[in-house]
Amino acid sequence: MKKQVLSVLAVLCILSMLCMTAFAAPYSLEADKVAAWLGNPENTQFDYEETSFVDNLIDWTAFSLSRAGKSAPAEYADYINAAVAASFDKMYPSDLARTVLAVTANGMDAKKIGGHDLLAALAAVDYSAQIYLSSLNAPLLAMNFKSDFPFEDSLKNGIVEAILSVQQPDGGWAYCSVDQGYGVYSDADSTSMTVQALAPYYAENEAVGRAVDKALAYLRAQIGATGALEAWGAPSGESTAQFVLALCELGINPTDSAYTNNGKTLLDGVKSFISENGGAMNYQGAQDPLTTYQVLLALNAANRYAENRESVFTYAPKAEEPTNPNPIAPSVPENTTTVDSAQTVEIPKTGSAVTATGAFVAVLCAGAVLVLRKKDA
């Protein structure tokens, strides 16, 4: 009997290890490596003393690190409060949305940042006047980030309609829907970001479904032989990362054969831009925070998809608390909250887990040990 129990124990333990291996986040090693680079101030060289404007790289870095379960820079809370207080009247809808995402992901109250209620400001924007897609897709992402955000469906549906109305004939979306002297043409980044924003409506809204399907066809046609999207004549880590995010938001496997070229998946394409020390390389072959935070988001999105977790742009406090238990907070008292609106016209800018199965097998292993001990007693 003892030998039989030992045999069962050995088999169960092997199964447990196999389960943990099979269900572990497939890109956790790469994500940790990239996050380590992004979290190193010597690499990013951010100036937290410059608070006359809100820096999109600082915000997105804080958001990306937090969503990957890492700590945002310690200076971020003080920085963003000071930056919003100093530049609120100059913030555009995309600035408001990005800041809402970043502060919320890091456990801060978006209604009390720099003395302003950013949620109220986001709701007060006239979205019918926006001509830049980031003034539409970013706010929609932010409004749907947290389930208890107080945004009316009518407001969000109006943004959806505004987005659908400016889709280009080829299925993509342009950076700007009005010619500002450089033409109106679809680009991969704007298209992927717009798909991310439309993702919550994909299954329930037929018009959105048709628009997104056309957009996916547009994006799929740009996948090159390395698995990366060919943007502006060259493989782009940023464009590839944004496409991965879009697919994951839709609940589509980013390694599906439909999005594979020459045997290379989109994740192969993303990984090809990661240097040995974790920094992601831009189109010039240099490591920079802009490319790196997008690559980290893509890896995180793929891991979340593999683990059947909430998406990058879906806030779930219970799921996030174990990996980010201590939300950052400013070291100085916040100003009195006020309700304001922000400018409504955008300016161009350059721009390891174990599943329940493994846990169950581990419990069985423990049970087998107890049986063995009772037998020997």
Image (spheres, rainbow, N blue to C red):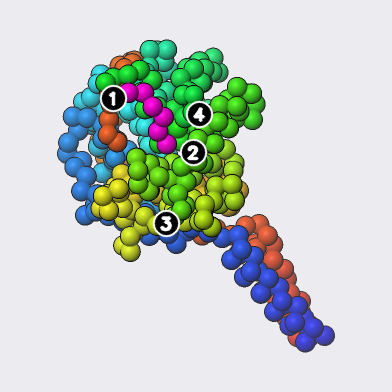
Determine the residue positioned at 46% across, 36% down: 192
**Which residue was labeled with disc 2?**
219
Q: Is residue 375 magenta?
A: no
Q: Position of residue 28 (x, y in %)?
A: 47, 58
Q: Which element type, helix, strand or loop, lies under badge 3?
A: helix
Identify the residue at image location x=17%, y=36%.
50
Q: Main secondary structure of the magenta part?
A: loop
N-terminal of the pair, mark 4 or mark 1, is 4
> What amino acid is at disc 2?
Leu
Crowding at dot 1, Cα within 10 Å, few <14 / some 14-19 / many 20+, comes out as few
Q: Which mark is nearer the camera, 3 or 1?
A: 1
Q: Is residue 223 left or right of residue 56?
A: right
Give the mark nearer the N terminus: 3 vs 4: 4
Callout 4: helix, strand or loop? loop
Marks 2/4: CA–CA distance: 9 Å
Q: Give the residue at mark 4.
A: 171
Asked if one can make out residue 313 in the rendered structure from this viewpoint, the answer is no
Any part of residue 40 in sight: yes
Q: Is residue 181 left or right of residue 159?
A: left
In the depicted view, which residue is nearer to us: 187 or 65? 187
The span picked out in magenta is: 183-188
Q: Quadrant of the C terminus?
A: bottom right
Mark 3 burial class by Cα count in 10 Å: few <14, some 14-19, many 20+: many
